[in-house]
Every structure is written in structure tokens, then in C-alpha cells.
């Protein structure tokens, strides 16, 4: 299975891209609108991947954020939710918003996703609501603690918030480390 791909984005569309690896092989990946918006054509990029093998196709789905990848993997395990519906959820809702919808039973927000009707929304909430829903990203407490630590190191609050929004670590020390790498 392909877990990640690093290479140059040679073609970018709203929900797909082609990435050329150092070996010379190019891969086509499906993307959410959120991931696609963060990519720059011609730039070296690493994408976490989910590979789905079917009888008629070998599909790759790319993600910049680990939390979005976890949400996608959680959704495709549910009955009646395929990869295209899961990708529509990733394009419409941030992982934290999706987790909040499930936790609060907000079927109305889920039905705003193309391809999800009231019945599917209720099924998603029922199937994920009974189990402990995965943490899809850092909690606000961890983000605030990390922001304070980074601010004490002399970084500007606006830049800190921008960087922390793209971080996926789920505790304060890892968030600070991840943010420092991006700020350097």
C-alpha cells in the first residue's frame, strides 16, 4: 500500500492533481477541495495517501492534513459511504466540524454535503456516535497552550495562528515542535 507520496505537483485541478516523484513516475491523486486549495503547482509537496484497490481501478486519495485522512478513512468504513461521498465530506467540512456534527447529532449540517441525504446523515451519526469518535485534530486547549509558548519565543500571534491551523499534532509539546518546524 502507498502511504505517502513526495514530488512536484505537475498538474492541479479542483479535486485532483498529478505529482511527479524523483524516480520519474507520476501519480494521479484525488483530493478534497480543502487540500487542493493549499497546493501550489510546481512546488515540492508530500501528501499522505489512502490507496483503494478495486477490480477495475487502483485509486489514490491525497491529503495534506493527517486529520483529514483519518476522517476519510473513518467514513469509508461505514456502510453506504463510499470514497466519493467521503471525499465530499472532506471538501465540505473541516475534521473538527465533522466531529462536532457527529458528537452533537447535527444531521442538518451533514445533509449540506453533496451526496448525503437525511437517512445517510442519521446512519453516520448513529454508527459513529456509539463509538468513541476519533480526535481529528488538536483541541483548542492544546492550540492555545502552544500559541502561548510560541508567542513567548517571540513569534507574532497572526503567524502562529496561521501555522497552528495546519498542524495535526494532538498534544501541546508536539504542536509546538510541529509549528517550530514550519516557522523555521
Image (cartoon, rainbow, N blue to C red):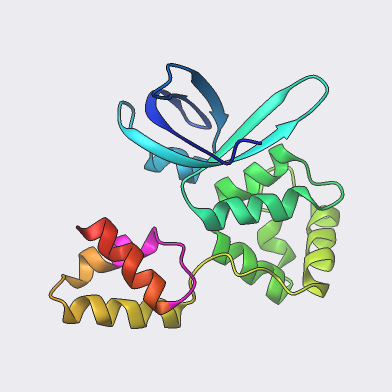
| Relative to 62, 55 lies left or right | right
Q: Residue at x 27, y 56 (%)?
A: 182
Quarter where residue 62 is shown: top right
Work out which quarter of the rendered image holds the N terminus and state it: top right
Residue at position x 42%, y 40% from top?
46
162 above or below 176? above
Examine the image and state in which quarter residue 176 appears: bottom left
Relative side of 137 to 82, left or right:
left
**Residue furthest left as drawn:** 154
Q: Is residue 45 above or below residue 148?
A: above
Please state if 76 lies on the left or on the right of 144 as rendered.
right
Of residues 183 and 166, which is closer to you in this image? 183
Residue 134 at x, y = what percent?
66, 68
| Quadrant assignment, res 181 | bottom left
Q: Position of residue 153 (x, y in %)?
A: 16, 77
Residue at the farthest top position: 24
Q: Which quarter shows the C terminus?
A: bottom left
Residue 54 image offset from top left, x and y in percent: 79, 27
As displayed, is residue 91 above or below residue 111?
above
Looking at the rendering, the stretch of residues picked out in magenta corresponds to 161-171
Q: Is residue 124 left or right of residue 153?
A: right
Q: Is 55 in the magenta? A: no
Residue located at (71% from left, 55% from top): 74
Percent position of residue 148, x then y: 26, 82
Amino acid at each position: 500500500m502507498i502511504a505517502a507520496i513526495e514530488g512536484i505537483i505537475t498538474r492541479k485541478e479542483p479535486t485532483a492533481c498529478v505529482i511527479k516523484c524523483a524516480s520519474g513516475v507520476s501519480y494521479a491523486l484525488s483530493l478534497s477541495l480543502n487540500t487542493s486549495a493549499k497546493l501550489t503547482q510546481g512546488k515540492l509537496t508530500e501528501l499522505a495517501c489512502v490507496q483503494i484497490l478495486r477490480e477495475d481501478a487502483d485509486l489514490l486519495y491525497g491529503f495534506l492534513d493527517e486529520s483529514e485522512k483519518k476522517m476519510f478513512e473513518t467514513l469509508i468504513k461505514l456502510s453506504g459511504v463510499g470514497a466519493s461521498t467521503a471525499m465530499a465530506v472532506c471538501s465540505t467540512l473541516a475534521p473538527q466540524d465533522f466531529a462536532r456534527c457527529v458528537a452533537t447529532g447535527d444531521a442538518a449540517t451533514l445533509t449540506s454535503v453533496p451526496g448525503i441525504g437525511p437517512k445517510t446523515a442519521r446512519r453516520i451519526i448513529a454508527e459513529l456516535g456509539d463509538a468513541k469518535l476519533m480526535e481529528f485534530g488538536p483541541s483548542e486547549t492544546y492550540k492555545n497552550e502552544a500559541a502561548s509558548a510560541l508567542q513567548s519565543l517571540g513569534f507574532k500571534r497572526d503567524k502562529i495562528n496561521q501555522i497552528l491551523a495546519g498542524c495535526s499534532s494532538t498534544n501541546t509539546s508536539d504542536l509546538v515542535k510541529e509549528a517550530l518546524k514550519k516557522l523555521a
